[in-house]
Image: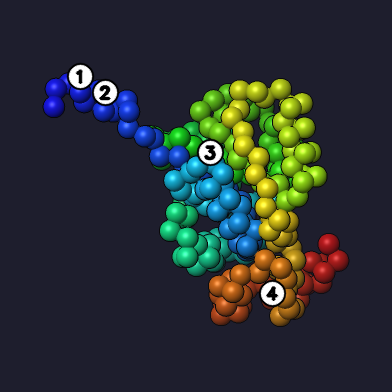
Amino acid sequence: MDRAAKERRLKTKKKPRIGIFPGAFDPVHAGHVAFALTALQKGNLDEVVFLPERQPLSRPGAEHYAHRVSMIKSALRPHPRCSVLELAERRFRTTKTLPTLRAVFPDAELFLLISSKALPDLLQRPYIGQAFKDFGLIIGAGNKADLSRTREILKQSGQCSIRTLVVGHSEMNVRSSKIRYALRSNGYATGLLASVRSYARREWLYVSAAAHSLEKYN
């Protein structure tokens, strides 16, 4: 094959489309998985990579990182196009983590998966347009009202340079706090995965009496 033919082949080769899903995942639940699978389909992705934060700012009392990673891996076993990425960084930061991800996946088209609740804070971060110069956004909403509200926020944000896709799924309404309370009280909560319940029982996770009381009233 001559040089010109090789260059044409490289130009026409399809870049893998990868979604990056950061979060505390304390613990991972059906809403997270539903969002990932919906993003795979609606975003025409080849893979979704879960990116658990070691020390999530939103969950200062999160269970140990290794336990959260193990629960994600168990939850994703039935879904071969979903995986877990472990970075050394303590938490997700747009200006630092996005360049790291670009280095990890140099030949891929990358999309960040976030919930609609996280969107306003993300859009207010400095240099957001520059940070997303070669990333897309896939935003998960839980119902029609949430979808409409999210689209309006994007319209008013002025960040037209960021490629965005808003997807909806009813299971995205699951709250991790309710999952944690159900595990502590040996009860049931919508979105609690069997693999997570089994792992949490075996490792004695989410059993703190003080935290149990706190979760109940928050």
Residue ID at (74%, 38%): 150
Q: Which mark is residue 183?
A: 4
For label 1, the SS is helix
Q: Depth check: 169 or 63 in front?
A: 169
| Amino acid type, label 4 | Leu
| CA separation in Å, label 1 and label 3 | 31 Å
**Marks 2,1: beta carbons within 8 A:** yes
| CA separation in Å, label 4 and label 1 | 61 Å
Q: Label 1 neighbourhood size at 10 Å, few (<14), some (14-19), many (20+)?
A: few
For label 4, the SS is helix
| Amino acid type, label 1 | Ala
Residue hosting label 3: 111
Considering every residue shown, the one lying at the far left of the view is 1
Sequence-wise first label, 2 or 4:
2
Q: Which mark is residue 8?
A: 2
Q: Nearer the viewer, mark 2 or mark 4?
A: 2
For label 2, the SS is helix
